[in-house]
Image: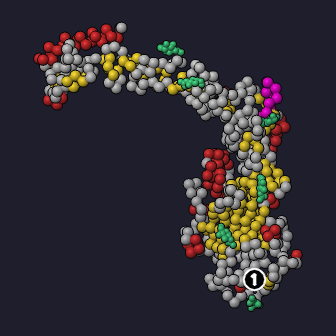
Amino acid sequence: MRVWLMVTLQAAWSCFSGLAMQHYPTWGHYDICKSQLYTEDGLTWDYMACQPEAADMTQYLKVTLDPPDITCGNPPETYCALENPYMCNNECDATTEELAHPPELMFDFEGRNPTTFWQSSSWRKYPKPLAVNITLSWNKTIELTDDIVITFESGRPEQMVLEKSLDYGKTWQPYQFYATDCLDAFTMDPKTVQDLSQFTLLDIICTEEYSRGYVWKYDKTVRFEIKDRFALFAGPRLHNMASLYGQLDTTKNLRDFFTITDLRIRLLRPATGATMVDEGNLSRYFYAISDIKVHGRCKCNLHANSCVFDKEKLSCECEHNTTGPDCGRCKRNYQGRAWSAGSYLPIPKGTANICVPNNVGPVNCECFGHSNRCSYIELINTVICVSCKHNTRGQHCQLCKLGFYRNASAELDDENVCIDCNCNPLGSESDRCNGTGFCVCKGGATGSKCGQCLPGFLWDNGCRSRVCDDELLRCQNGGVCVNNVRCQCAPGFSGLLCEKVQCDGGVDCGSSDSARTSVPSFIIIILLLLLLRSS
Ligand SMILES: *[C@@H]1O[C@H](CO)[C@@H](O)[C@H](O)[C@H]1NC(C)=O
Ligand SMILES: *[C@@H]1O[C@H](CO)[C@@H](O)[C@H](O)[C@H]1NC(C)=O
Ligand SMILES: *[C@@H]1O[C@H](CO)[C@@H](O)[C@H](O)[C@H]1NC(C)=O
Ligand SMILES: *[C@@H]1O[C@H](CO)[C@@H](O)[C@H](O)[C@H]1NC(C)=O
Ligand SMILES: *[C@@H]1O[C@H](CO)[C@@H](O)[C@H](O)[C@H]1NC(C)=O
Ligand SMILES: *[C@@H]1O[C@H](CO)[C@@H](O)[C@H](O)[C@H]1NC(C)=O
Ligand SMILES: [Ca+2]
């Protein structure tokens, strides 16, 4: 099949790839979910893995503070500067717009001067900890694409934990610990993101990088380093995104690590700028955050290239006949095969893994009631039943599993349609039988299940030919005939009728005199065997 990609799209593609190179860092350019193709058979669609563009996610979140009344200004308060207790011109009054510091000011556009910030009330209750939780909720799964950056206006906290939730706030996991002294605060050894490797990427570390020393005035940010972590797979300047995609595709843990529904900043101890807290002037200690950056994209399982914010809620605009907030299901009547996320691979278009209609082409998802699930096999363009029950198998569950045969008196959709072959495991060659339940017997065995022996054979863990008796076929040299199928020889003798003498070391050293006399009976046995086989 010859394929021409539409010229306009081709242009779009090269344009996007050009963009992607300059426009660092995007997760590649999975911008298009489908494109029309001209083939010899006419117009068809080509489906591709796609994802929404990364964006500033702080526009879409809901922020919650705990304790709820921790914001300053109610009642009004005057604050002193951390670095100068005599500089006390910071007034906070919730009832006056110019003097209020509500939480929204953490997410407003920060191009203005002076900066706008949220501020907590001061550490009046010292030495009781001044603990504040700031929870950011999206009510939507988000994939982080860039560093989380929090800008503090009055010193970076001496102790802080960044946490994440992947289940809308039901459970929380730490992302990173921050402290001036990790060992003291969290009994963790201090590390930096540079200490991580591909193998320890998912380790949760405590870092002193963002709270050390008294340099807060010039370095106000606390980061959670997403890009440095990506770089462990994609190279220092994220030039090898294919490698990262490959990893993300195959490693669920890694994908989940960068996926969130909520973030929580747990502020545990404000900046003091010194080892001793100035108890005489606690209005120097408080939290003030001017900006929080969270860059990411809606997680749409590579089935949507746009995500809309409607009625205070983000949701993917699902393609590929998927649905759900994350395109995590197949649409009704498009469940011809199990849902699966799109794949980044092969680079650059990925694999769409579209949902297919329940009835595809000439073949339906018809399983005679033995399964309600079908799978679409792209390679042969066919829908097949999966997990056939009632011992059936086949594209439509129309065959019996090996070891079972068709019940002639049952319809194809009957639960009893397949009957266990029940082949005697000792008398049969295998556990399979033919269409009327006949098993294939080993030599000497007979019956539909091979549980009986032919004349001249005796049951002894299967059918064995008659070897010895008390008349013609006597065991020699004091051997005892067991069940007519074998001679139990006296020590020093071996052979079918114990006709061989064993020398020292158990080596057969020829027939004894008495054994020689038994040769004729040995020949009789062979003759008998031949006779039985041919009958
Ligand atoms: C803190 O110290 C400054 C300078 O001594 C003073 O003006 C201010 O009132 C003090 N604040 C408190 C709460 O004591
Ligand atoms: C903050 O969250 C933690 C649990 O993660 C909880 O123990 C604590 O009570 C919350 N509130 C404050 C004010 O710390
Ligand atoms: C979250 O989104 C779901 C729909 O996906 C909605 O039913 C629910 O009310 C939302 N929850 C909040 C807290 O907004
Ligand atoms: C999804 O279903 C609609 C309606 O049948 C169809 O027109 C469309 O082509 C399908 N899309 C995909 C990606 O299969
Ligand atoms: C064959 O199917 C019929 C009809 O369902 C059933 O009554 C019968 O028990 C089945 N035979 C066996 C051996 O299962
Ligand atoms: C199964 O094998 C038996 C015995 O060999 C034979 O009589 C019968 O016709 C076979 N049935 C089928 C369906 O081949
Ligand atoms: Ca601000």
Render colour scheme: secondary structure
Q: Which residue is mark 1?
A: 81
* Dominant secondary structure, magenta: strand
* Residue 119 location (% of width, % of height): 77, 75
Between 4 and 509, the one lying in front of the other is: 509
Is 48 part of what is drawn in magenta? yes
Image quadrant in which you'd find residue 91? bottom right
Residue at 63%, 69% (x, y): give it.
178
* Residue 181 location (% of width, % of height): 59, 74
Confirm whether residue 495 shows in the render. Answer: no
Q: Give the amino acid type for the residue marked by disc 1 in the picture.
A: Ala
User: Which quadrant: the C terminus?
Assistant: top left
User: Which quadrant: the N terminus?
Assistant: top right
Between 13 and 362, the one lying in front of the other is: 362
* Residue 83 location (% of width, % of height): 72, 83
The residue range painted magenta reads 37-49
Is 308 part of what is drawn in magenta? no
Between 464 and 417, the one lying in front of the other is: 417
Residue at 84%, 77% (x, y): give it.
94
Residue at 67%, 65% (x, y): give it.
162
Residue at 56%, 57% (x, y): give it.
200
Residue lying furthest right: 97
Residue lying furthest left: 513
Between 228 and 371, the one lying in front of the other is: 371
Badge 1 element: loop
**Above-or-below relation of 75 to 327:** below
Does residue 425 appear to the left or right of 31 in the view shown? Answer: left
Does residue 475 appear to the left or right of 186 in the view shown? Answer: left
